[in-house]
Amino acid sequence: DVQLQASGGGLVQTGGSLRLSCEASGFTLDDYAIGWFRQAPGKEREGVSCISSSDGSTYVSDSVKGRFTISSDNAKNLVYLQMDSLKPEDTGVYYCAVDQRATPRDTATILCTYGMNYWGKGTLVTVSS
């Protein structure tokens, strides 16, 4: 049973940093694409950053490029999102997700754009101005 549990959200001032963690259980990360998504109040969900397992590509949203970094520790089954230079517009609920699809079409851009198969409960990030 694939389970994902995100943590690390909280209240931070503009310019601050947070590191989100996602603990995966019931499977091993080695063969799965990983990603972080967010949903701001009143807005649609958007892909923040994803890594494809089919070609190793990485997608980073233009809105966070240069500030956010996705990574994983497969030995510990953990996925991270390091968020630096936070802005009020980064406020939202952040979700980690994984996907076992690994065809050539399943690039990081595609998965981050259309979503993944398995989702964890979100963690709230609030950036104050």
Image (cartoon, rainbow, N blue to C red):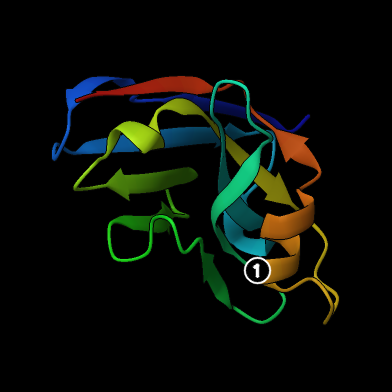
Relative placement, left or right, of 9 versus 112 is left
Q: x and y percent of residue 48 in the render? A: 52, 51
Residue 81 in view, yes or no: yes
For label 1, the SS is helix
**What residue would you read off at disc 1?**
108
Q: Quadrant of the C terminus?
A: top left
Q: Residue at the location (79% across, 54% down)? A: 114
Vertically, is 121 above or below 23? above
Give the amino acid at mark 1: Ala
Q: x and y percent of residue 125 in the render? A: 37, 24
Q: x and y percent of residue 113 in the render? A: 72, 57
Relative placement, left or right, of 68 versus 124 is left
At label 1, counting other C-alpha atoms closer than 10 Å, the crowd grade (few under 14, some 14-19, many 20 or more) is many
Vertically, is 72 above or below 8? below
Q: Quadrant of the N terminus?
A: top right
Residue situated in front as seen by the camera: 34 or 63: 63
Q: Residue at the location (84% across, 77% down)? A: 105
Image quadrant where residue 63 sits: bottom left
